[in-house]
Structures are given as structure tokens and as C-alpha cells.
Amino acid sequence: MSHLSERPEKPAVGVALPHESAVLHVTGTALYTDDLIHRTKDVLHAYPVQVMKAHGRITKLDTEPALDVPGVVRVLTGADVPGVNDAGMKHDEPLFPDEVMFHGHAVAWVLGEDLEAARLGAAAVEVELDEQPALITLQDAMAADSYHGARPLMETGDIDAGFADSAHVFTGEFQFSGQEHFYLETHAALAQVDENGQIFIQSSTQHPSETQEIVSHVLGVPAHEVTVQCLRMGGGFGGKEMQPHGFAAVAALGAKLTGRPVRFRLNRTQDLTMSGKRHGFHASWRIGFDADGRIQALDATLTADGGWSLDLSEPVLARALCHIDNTYWIPNARVAGRIARTNTVSNTAFRGFGGPQGMLVIEDILGRVAPQLGLDPMELRERNFYRPGQGQTTPYGQPVTQAERISTVWHQVQENAGLADRRREIAAFNAAHPHTKRAIAVTGIKFGISFNLTAFNQGGALVLIYKDGSVLINHGGTEMGQGLHTKMIQVAATTLGIPLHKVRLAPTRTDKVPNTSATAASSGADLNGGAIKNACEQLRERLLQVAASQLGANASDVRIVEGVARALGSEKELAWDELVRTAYFQRVQLSAAGFYRTEGLHWDARTFRGSPFKYFAHGAAATEVEVDGFTGAYRIRRVDIVHDVGDSLSPLIDIGQVEGGFVQGAGWLTLEDLRWDTGDGPGRGRLQTQAASTYKLPSFSEMPEEFNVTLLENATEEGAVYGSKAVGEPPLMLAFSVREALRQAAAAFGPSGAGVELASPATPEAVYWAIEEARALRDTAAVDGHSVEALSGA
């Protein structure tokens, strides 16, 4: 077992603990960024001047009327920016634009003594526009050849030979929607300036170091004059990885110019209309199978809807390409990617970061073609799994080293779900109920863990031991409710060999741990846990020397377990608090900076080849649904999941992440339907689903009636801290099983062996039209007497 993954005696990791702030959350005493204004004197409130047109050049921006509104202190415009007027890392997102690029684009910000004054001031600002044509949909952009950013191409094998060897070839298209993050806490920031002109920003951000970087270049000051802290977030899901930076810069600029604290918080409608979503995608594809239903070749083009600026669209697209194989070996492939530029919000990171979009394409293909191949969808999927010992690599060239886990979770979830018996029960139910159908589907996942950009795979930590034996840890990861801080406390306690109550965690801030990566890519525990472990090991080694001198033993023979140092073979012991005091009086350093970098990664973005991921996380889900034939309405009767988190650092946290990820994925695939006004009227480009009343989120009524989650046992990951694996993003894709079950239930209204197409999101309306497609196949088969294969074969 590797040094990184080995667990000591009586570790604090692996213990099922509640979230470290759970009590604060449920009692309402947890503080979030916007709560801090009540503890801050003389705060100004920022409010956006939004232009409700989708595209046009600004010909007039008159801020004078706003200054006549009582309580308005200042209006911020591009003329006030002392540094670079840009809020993005690609320098294509002007903080104060002279061209409106989407409906609701903010072109100026009003600072008021209270929020109402700022709102009235923003309404008084006069903006005139030279309107331009607007591209709202993916189809609009594709028809206009409107693209930006990189166009990656992933190739492996011989695509032409693969199709030549294929007994069956199918072609198709598939377009699916994005998703709104709908975190409970909207974007928020609070900026203050001290007597030296240094800026301190409280921000709801997943990437404090990048928020610091953007603010510093907007203000034209070095990074050491800007400190960013993230106390906690009320959800993020990727939506706060890139997009908080400009908002924090607005608050910082206001504070710098007025000398007063500036508070910024979007209301829900502003957040929905101004912030980016998960990228919607269009896929065109051609796939070939041999006579036994094994994939021979795949030729596909994925087009991501990037919105008006690049944001993170390039790495999102890259990860989509890297995950189009999912759990299936594709020996010959050519997959091209491109990013459409539309006049909508700039789409951004969302849990899975392109992986779900790539994987959905192949799962949709297999679900569609299985009936045409005369195969059960589960059988078709299993026939194409990566196999251990075959030397198989992904289409981008990374070996699949744990292929056996794909089959392990697949078979275990079927056993846990009692699949064989339940499929017979479902067949009997369907035969007896002409207007209601049930179905059960199983899908698996293989999700790569690490940032696509190798440089981001690093983490830092600062660990302090005080004279009384208490420990304070700082790390570069942010807490958005996912339990990262809980795990980090467990890692520190385990490494030092002390009880959990001895460890406290400080809020994430850039003057404690610099140059950190975003808490994203499911890598928070891997990177920051590795860094904390490194810092604690430095401290432990120093303390072992002190303990050895006190116990009369060699340092290599001393162990610290549950806060007591003992030498092997000796009954003498030294309590932790006494050990720390002794070390202090011996002038032993009791603080350490830790660092971790993920080893073994390499990636060539130009050739689209390499091993960008440290390991793969695996999982499988079996979902049973019931569908009403009159309305398309459905309910999820039961879900069984087996998921691979390695050796869990915190099982209660991980099970919660699996459950939450699955439900969020089910929301994306079945409920959450983003709609924009695509007409030619004055509201063109307006987001129509800009409230919870029009954008449907999963709630208690959509939860599975029975929900069973099992963490894979004996699953140590040698390459990660204490043998654990990432858990944040992979479970979301287990929800593919919901969509495939709905497809099969809809098809059950048709003749035996029928297959149907299913839109995404698979709303009740979409399911109803799939049912109608199945009924049409049944009616045609009844009239013509033809087989379903003859009707739907390629």
C-alpha cells in the first residue's frame, strides 16, 4: 500500500460523521457572505443597470439622472476602472461593456445608501442602443457559423476500417438542454478597504485565488493588495468557479473609489438572468457495430452552447470529448468539438463539467439502437464494457486500469436490486395494465478525476499547533455544503493521531494559502487532503523527535494514537498536550505549510492525447419508473446505487453526495427545462424560466420512493489520500438510468422490441410524445403485419 493511501491505527477518517456545520445550517446560525453586512458599518449597496435587449452597441449611457435619486452615492462605469476592464480569464468579458451581448447584460452599477435607492438609481440611468441581430439558440449559431474558441479533434484507430468492418451502422442527431445551478445562495460579495488602501473581499466563490487575480487586474494593483475570503457558500455546483470574479470586482472597485464597504448580492431573478448555466449540446453521430453488437467505430461532432463569451467552455468541451466513451471500449473513433457563440449568458462549469454531456451522447445512442439490434439495452451495454487485462485505452490514449470495477458495480447493483425477480414482476404488471407501464434500467459510469489543465492539480495548506495542543488548519478548498471541511478535519486528526475535537478549520482565504486551484473537478479532497496530510506529517515528524527524547526511544518506534504518544514495547506514554508544550519550550516549530501535486498526469491539448486523469470513479444505478399513458407523468419507484469512492474518508458525507448528485442529475435529465424567447419581438433573448415558478426543480415529490445507496467495499485507491476517491461529480451521471427507464417504459406502450427516441429533458410532455411514437409503431405493425425490426432497422 502506498504511503499516501495507508491508514494508521485508529484513524479518524472512515468514521461516519455529520457535516461539521450541520447544526449551524439547520438552526440558521451559519453565516454566509451577505449576512456579514449586518456586522459592517456604513455599507453601500450595488445594483446593476441591466439592458433588456439581446444584442446591440451602446450609443448613449447617461448616469446623471441616477445621481439625482436620493440615497444614490455613485454610478460605476468603464471610465472608473483604473486597471483592466475585463472580468474573464480569456479577456473577452468586459466588466463594463460597450456592447450588450445578452438580454439582461449589466452595463453599469449604481451604489446606494440602501438597496432601494440603488435600485431606483439603476432604473433612472438612460441607455440607448443600436440593436443588432441576436443568435439565441444553438441552431441559430450553427446556421450562422458562429463559433469561438478551440476546435479539438480526438482520434483513435482507423475510423474508415472500423465502419467497413461494421455489420450495422446507425446515424442520428441529439440535442439536449443545459441546467440552471439554482444554488440557495445567489452571487454575493462584500468589499472593504483599509487605511493602507488594501482590499479585503468576502466572496461566495469556489476559486478565491482567481477572484483575487481578477480583482487585482481590474483595480490595477498587485495581488498582495487584495485578500479574498470565502466563509462558506450556500451551494455552488460549478456556478461559482468563474463567474463570481466580476461581481467581486464591482464591489472592490466601489469600495476603492468611495472608501466605504460595498455589498453586492444578486436577487434570484438577476442571478438567473445574468449568470451562466450548464452547457446545452448538439451531437451528430454515426456508429458502427459488429454482428454481435460490439462497437466498431464512432464518428461524432459535439457542439457546445458557449453563450456570449468563452468562460470555461473550452475545458468543458474537452472533458465532454474525453467522456464520450463512458464505460465502453471504442476501438476506432473520431470525435470533433466546437463551441457555438450565442447571445445568451456565458455558460460555465456545472457539476460534471462536460463529462455528463459527453456520456449522455453515448448512453442515448445505445438506448436508441439496442432495439434495432434486437438486444436488451442492458446486454448491449455490458457487451461493450472495457475489459480487464485487454490493454484497452480510452480514445485519447489513457489506459483503463480498473476496468474490473465497471463490471463489479454493474453486477452488484443488479444483485442488490433483485433485478431478475423485479423484471418478471414488471413484465406481469405491464401485461395487466394497458394505460400504465413500468420499466427498470441499469446504467454505469466511468468518470475521470483531475483537472484537464495539469497545472491546476495542486493544493496547499497551512497547519498551526498552539501551545495548548489545539490545532488550526487552513487549506485552499472552499466549502459549498459538500462536506470538504469535515473531511479535512478528519484527515488532519488522522495524520497527527489526535481526537477530532482538537482540530478546528479556518475559513478559506488567499493570505493564508496562496495560488490555490478552484474547488472543482471533484478534486477538493484529493488536493487539499494531500496538502493537509503533508503539513501534518511535517509536524508529526518534529513531534516524534520530541516524544522520543521524553520516552527514551527511537523516533521511528514512537506512535501517536488518540492523542497519546507511546513507544513500541514500552508502557511509558506522553499526552498530546504535554508533548506540544514540551516541543514549544524546546523551540520546535509548530506550524507547517503543506503542498500536494497530483503525480503521473500528462496531457497534450494540441494532439488531444495523454493521461489527464489520476484515476476513474465508477458506479452503477438501477432505476424503476412508472409512466402514465394518458399524460406522460411518471414517478420514480425505486433506485439502487453502488458507487466507488475508494476507502471513504467520511461515509455519511459521501452517501449524501451520492444521493444529492443523483437527484440533481435526474433534475437535469427529466425536469429542468430552460426556455428563452426565440421570437422576433422586443423580448427576444429573454430567459422565460427565470423563477422557481417556471423552472421546475426536483423536490420531495420527485425523490425515489425507495432509495438505496451502497458504497463499494474493498476499493482502496492507491493514488489518493488515505485510499479515498472523489465523490462530488460522478454520482450525477448515475441518473442516466432514470432517463433510460423512462425510454423503456414509453416503448412498452408499443409492440415487443420497439424503440423510441426521447427528448432531454424528458419532461412528462416529452415522455408523452415518446409514448405516442411507440403507439404509432404498434398500430403500424398491427396494420401491416411487419416486424418492428423491419420498421426501425438501419
Image (cartoon, rainbow, N blue to C red):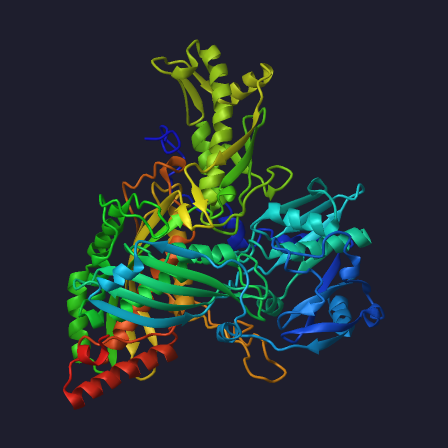
Q: Residue furthest bottom?
A: 783
Q: Nearer the viewer, residue 342 or 532?
A: 342
- The quarter of the displayed image where residue 583 is located: top right
Inspect this view and state whether residue 506 appears.
Answer: yes
Q: Is residue 480 above or below residue 11?
A: below
Q: Give the quadrant of the C terminus.
A: bottom left
Q: Nearer the viewer, residue 441 or 155?
A: 155
Q: Is residue 225 above or below residue 677?
A: above
Q: Give the quadrant of the N terminus.
A: top left
Inspect this view and state whether residue 632 appears.
Answer: no
Q: Residue furthest top?
A: 552
Counting from the top left corner in percent of width and height, residue 365 is at 31, 67
Counting from the top left corner in percent of width and height, residue 508 is at 58, 43
Q: Is residue 560 above or below residue 252?
A: above
- The quarter of the displayed image where residue 744 is located: bottom left
* Left or right of residue 783: residue 330: right
Residue at the (54%, 36%) spot, across then down: 460
* Left or right of residue 518: residue 525: left
Q: Nearer the viewer, residue 742 or 234?
A: 742
Residue at the (50%, 15%) spot, across then down: 546
Counting from the top left corner in percent of width and height, residue 703 is at 37, 65
Counting from the top left corner in percent of width and height, residue 507 is at 59, 43
Q: Nearer the viewer, residue 145 or 28?
A: 145
* Left or right of residue 709: residue 372: left
* Left or right of residue 458: residue 163: left
Disc tally is 0
- The quarter of the displayed image where residue 10 is located: top left
Residue at the (76%, 56%) spot, across then down: 81
